[in-house]
Amino acid sequence: MKKKTFFIMGMGLLLLLLIISCAKEKSGWKGTIEEENGVTVVRNPKQPIHTGSVLSFEEELVLRPDVESQEQSFNIITAICVDEAGTIYVLDMGDCQIKVFDRNGDFLRAIGGKGQGPGEMQMPSSMDLAGDERLVVYDMRKSCLSLFSLSGDFIKDLSVAKYFPLVRVRTDQKGHFVIQYHFRDEKSTGYKIILLDSNLELVSEIASVEQKQNPPRVLSLINPLLSYWTTKDGQILTGYSEDYELCFLNQKGDLVKKIITDYTPIPVSNEDKKRLTEERFPESRGGVPEGTKMEFPDHYPPFSSFLIDSIGRIFVGTYEKAGEGMHYYDIFDPEGRYLARVPVYDRVRAIEQGKLYTVEEDEEGYQVVKRYHIKWTI
């Protein structure tokens, strides 16, 4: 009888510990979702739903440079796209090519090349995979969008000189272009995000922010950034990191959803200021120019960038370090609820079909592309 009693007590204690453990890892969402003037407003607390380990990364592929082949080596990687078959398209600004690999990492072909002729590039800085199975590349020096088929055939160039300097380009399922560019006029300077149709005619203005104007010879190295991403249903996700707010807009430019998240600001330390200054003005090159004043805020912006995976989860990069070569990312579900805060590798370029693609350096300092399998535990 005593053995049975002890057994029941032991099982009860074990069950209690499991309940406590689960409560720690999944605190439950304490946010709200409301409709305000026709807009869905999601408000998230500082605490995510899950506070334990919710995912891990398993390295499964490395695209290493072939020093004997320019086509199979990387110079300056600026973008990565992945299609539904797992084919990997790597935009190399240094070589002015798109280098294509199958899902197993075998080299297939190189698209483009340096030059001024049809299908050639000068300074390709941004790329997206359009819904109509075309690759769209923004060439900064030629100030145009170059369109290619996935098999590598050149289709045409579209001039975007009127929007110079363009920051990046993305596309939607209808073949529209969503571009971000820097504007400057007599009264202000800043960034705009606009939606253009397939003929580059303006459809709508999505977002616009003015930049703070510093006095002469005053330089700010940490500033709020305007970011955006396109969704599979044609909406545009935007965010200006002055506040922790993410906004979904339709193609008319109307706000349809807003995600507001409470957060703890990350302080800018003296070490950070010294590191950023050295990166901008290396001592080996003379350091900070005489008469130039460096200006820093007390805290970093709430986020640095974001991207959306293939099922609609939002990965938001923050400035909080999570170890060597990693920063913390806030992850939101497709509804906008704050799921978790997890360490993620720096220089993430794509998240597709449960895979994460990064640009890293090998032991010899060469750029490599790595693919990780994302293993969720929730």
Image: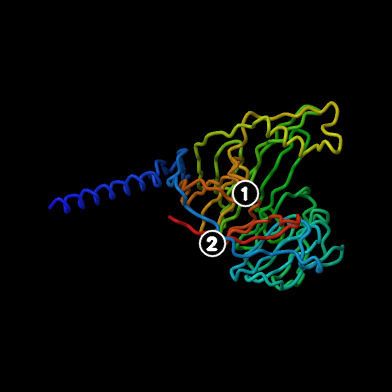
In the image, residue 377 lies at what x, y percent?
44, 56
Give 171 or 36, whichever is nearer the viewer. Answer: 171
What residue would you read off at disc 2?
354
Tell me what residue is drawn at x 55 percent, y 45 percent. 247
* 119 lies left or right of 205: right
Report helix, strand or loop for mark 1: strand
* 20 lies left or right of 204: left
Give 256 or 220, whichever is nearer the viewer. Answer: 220
Q: Quadrant of residue 272?
A: top right
Amino acid tagged 2: Gly
Q: Is residue 172 above or below residue 38?
A: below
In the image, residue 335 lies at what x, y percent?
46, 51
**Which of the two discs, 1 and 2, sits closer to the camera?**
2
Tell me what residue is drawn at x 80 percent, y 69 percent. 69
Tell me what residue is drawn at x 80 percent, y 65 percent. 67
| Residue 228: assigned label | 1
